[in-house]
Structures are given as structure tokens and as C-alpha cells.
């Protein structure tokens, strides 16, 4: 996964379900910094890590057989 990266967001605190955005950074203070397009403009959202689920929209590349990815 690379940051910035396109993500889908789920945050019940603000009733966000499957909204697509760009994860810009992960704060040491417990927030995701996400930029979300709304009505043709880009808005910044600071979402609490403890109450937000997200996944990267682009799948990981298929690994070749016998190739190990170090994380």
C-alpha cells in the first residue's frame, strides 16, 4: 500500500459508507487525513482511526509463485 492512495471509507460517526477518497496521511494523533471529492470540489476530512474502516481501492499486485513480500 502506498500513501497517498485511493481508499473507500466507512465511518458511522458521520454516516459515511463506501465513500471514495484519497488517503493523504496517518496522524500520530490518531486521525486519517483523507481528501474527499464532494460536489466537484475536494474537501479534507480528519477521521478518527478508532471509528473508521478503510481499504485501498487498488488491489495488491499478484505475487509470482515462490516470491515472498516483506512487510
Image (cartoon, rainbow, N blue to C red):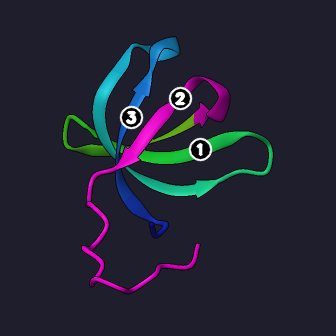
Using the image, tell me which numbered label, if any, was put on residue 9: 3
Q: Residue at x 74, y 39 (%)?
A: 30
In magenta stretch: residue 55:
yes
Q: Position of residue 65 (x, y in %)?
A: 28, 83
Spatial CA span between label 2 and label 3 = 7 Å
Q: Residue furthest left?
A: 40
In magenta stretch: residue 42:
no
The mark that comes first in sequence, 2 or 3, is 3
Mark 2 touches mark 3? (CB < 8 Å): yes
The mark that comes first in sequence, 2 or 1, is 1
Mark 1 touches mark 3? (CB < 8 Å): no
How many numbered markers are drawn?
A: 3
Q: In the drawing, does residue 27 fall left or right of residue 14?
A: right
Eyeballing the image, is 68 above or below 25? below
Disc 1 target residue: 32
Q: Position of residue 25 (x, y in %)?
A: 59, 58
- Is disc 2 placed on a helix, strand or loop? loop
Q: Nearer the viewer, residue 7 or 43?
A: 7
- Is disc 1 placed on a helix, strand or loop? strand
- What are the residue bounds of the magenta stretch? 47-71
Amino acid at each position: 500500500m502506498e500513501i497517498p492512495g485511493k481508499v473507500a471509507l466507512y465511518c458511522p460517526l458521520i454516516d459515511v459508507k463506501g465513500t471514495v477518497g484519497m488517503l493523504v496521511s496517518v496522524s500520530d494523533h490518531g486521525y486519517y487525513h483523507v481528501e474527499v471529492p464532494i460536489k466537484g470540489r475536494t474537501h479534507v476530512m480528519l477521521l478518527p482511526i478508532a471509528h473508521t474502516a478503510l481499504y485501498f481501492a487498488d488491489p495488491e499486485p499478484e505475487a509470482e509463485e515462490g516470491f515472498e513480500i516483506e512487510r
